[in-house]
Each structure stands twice: as structure tokens, then as C-alpha cells.
Image (cartoon, rainbow, N blue to C red):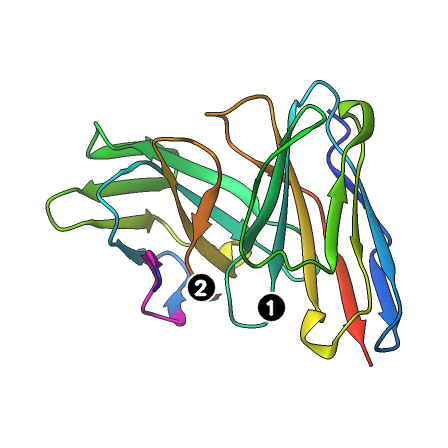
Amino acid sequence: DQQVKQNSPSLSVQEGRISILNCDYTNSMFDYFLWYKKYPAEGPTFLISISSIKDKNEDGRFTVFLNKSAKHLSLHIVPSQPGDSAVYFCAARNQAGTALIFGKGTTLSVSS
Amino acid sequence: DTGVSQNPRHKITKRGQNVTFRCDPISEHNRLYWYRQTLGQGPEFLTYFQNEAQLEKSRLLSDRFSAERPKGSFSTLEIQRTEQGDSAMYLCATSRGANEKLFFGSGTQLSVL
């Protein structure tokens, strides 16, 4: 059973607009959430993270929102740029901190 | 940081052969993880080391898989008697400690014919 779910396999956005990528999780023991970005033929690269004690974290154009009651988090990219086109993975860590559990990813395409 | 280095980048092998991959971590990163990624899936955890000790193995890691990290530096992942279902990208990631973000290598793409 998937503990981290990204239900949208793909998202297309125009340059300059907002991109919103969603992630749901089932395990209430997760205490830390991360977003990774992956380009073809490269390993995932860390983008932004949020602790379960917070509901928002912002870093430049990237903001992550966490709704613990709904077990839902989202990544907002504003404004979107063509270079943001990549696969975005949501990941969660349990309190034991042993390993990250990843969703299946969402492919973001930003057109100019 | 010179980054996490993985070799080879690509490996094509015939079913039944053994293969070995290598991962060189960022220096002073004491945690090292192996993940596997197949098409349309996110990275799936296989195993991790803290220094030279292998602390956890996923049930995905069958008896044909073995990983080592001698002296707590580089790590190797060996697959014996490869099967077509082993075809995947094998990713190595390292971190400074338990609650630090992971830095991934570029992966080794394995194709079993």
C-alpha cells in the first residue's frame, strides 16, 4: 500500500503562471516532508522541505504547504519557468528517520 | 562537496550474470542509502548504512542482492543471477546524519536482457 501518493502524473503550465503540485500521505507518524526535482539521466535533487510542526515553508519561488489534518501537502512554484520542467517527487520520513518514502512523481511541463 | 559518484552509469547484462555497482559518497557523509527506481515509479528504498554498519534492509532486497560498505567509505551493491525484473535505475544517496536531506548520485541504469 502506497504511503505517499502523487495522484497527478503530469501537469502543464504556462511560463509565469503558478504551478501547484499535490501530495497525500497516509502515515501520521511521518514527521518531515521533502520535495525533490529530477531531470532525465540525473539523480533527484533536493528542492525544499517542511517539518510536521509547521504549515508553510518558503524558499524563493518555491513554497510548500502542509495540512496535517488532511494529510496533504502541496508545492507552489511562482512564477513558473521553462527550466522548472522536470519530475517532482514528494517524500516523507518517519520519526525513526531511517529512510525516505517517495511518491511516484509528477511530471511538470512549463511552456514559454 | 564533490557530489555522490556512481559507476558505471549504464550496465547491460544477460540474464543470470552477476553485476556490481559502486557508490562513492560525499566525504564525511556517514549515512549511505541504496534506492531502486523503475519507470513510472518513485525511488524505492533498498538498504542503508551508517558508517560501515548495514542497519536496515527492505523486503525488496532479495537474497540475490548484497550491499557492503567497507571502512564506511564507498559502497558496492551486487546482484547475483540477474533477472529481467532487476532492470531499473539504481540510485545511491548519502547524508551527514539521520535527519539530514539526502544527496543523490546520477544512478546506474541496469538493463537485463
- The location of residue A30, given as percent across then percent down, is 30, 39
Q: Note whether B10 is above or below A38 in the view shown.
A: below
Residue A6, magenta (yes or no): yes
**In which chain is the residue bearing label 1?**
B
The answer for how far apart the CA atoms under marks 1 and 2 are is 10 Å
**Residue carrying label 1:** B38
Q: Note whether A94 is above or below B44 in the view shown.
A: above
> In percent of the image, x 70 and y 69: which residue is there?
B86
**In which chain is the residue bearing label 2?**
A
- The location of residue A108, given as percent across then percent down, is 45, 64
Task: Name the mark on residue A104.
Answer: 2
Range drawn in magenta: A3-11
Query: Which quadrant of the view contains residue A54?
Result: top left
- The location of residue A65, given as percent across then percent down, is 24, 42
Closest to the observer, B56 or B93: B56
In the image, what residue type sits under mark 1? Thr
The quadrant of the rendering that contains the N terminus of chain B is: top right
Judged from this view, the residue extending furthest toward the bottom is B113
**Callout 1 environment at 10 Å: few (<14), some (14 to 19), or many (20+)?**
some
Closest to the observer, A51 or B84: B84
Task: Name the mark on residue A15.
Answer: none
Q: Secondary structure at mark 1?
A: loop
Callouts 1 and 2 in the same chain: no
Judged from this view, the residue extending furthest toward the front is B63
Task: Kindly indicate whether the residue at mark 2 contacts the one at mark 1 (C-beta within 8 angstroms).
Answer: no
> In percent of the image, x 39 and y 34: which residue is there?
A60
Query: Which quadrant of the view contains residue B76?
Result: top right
Residue A62, magenta (yes or no): no
Relative placement, left or right, of B106 versus A68 is: right
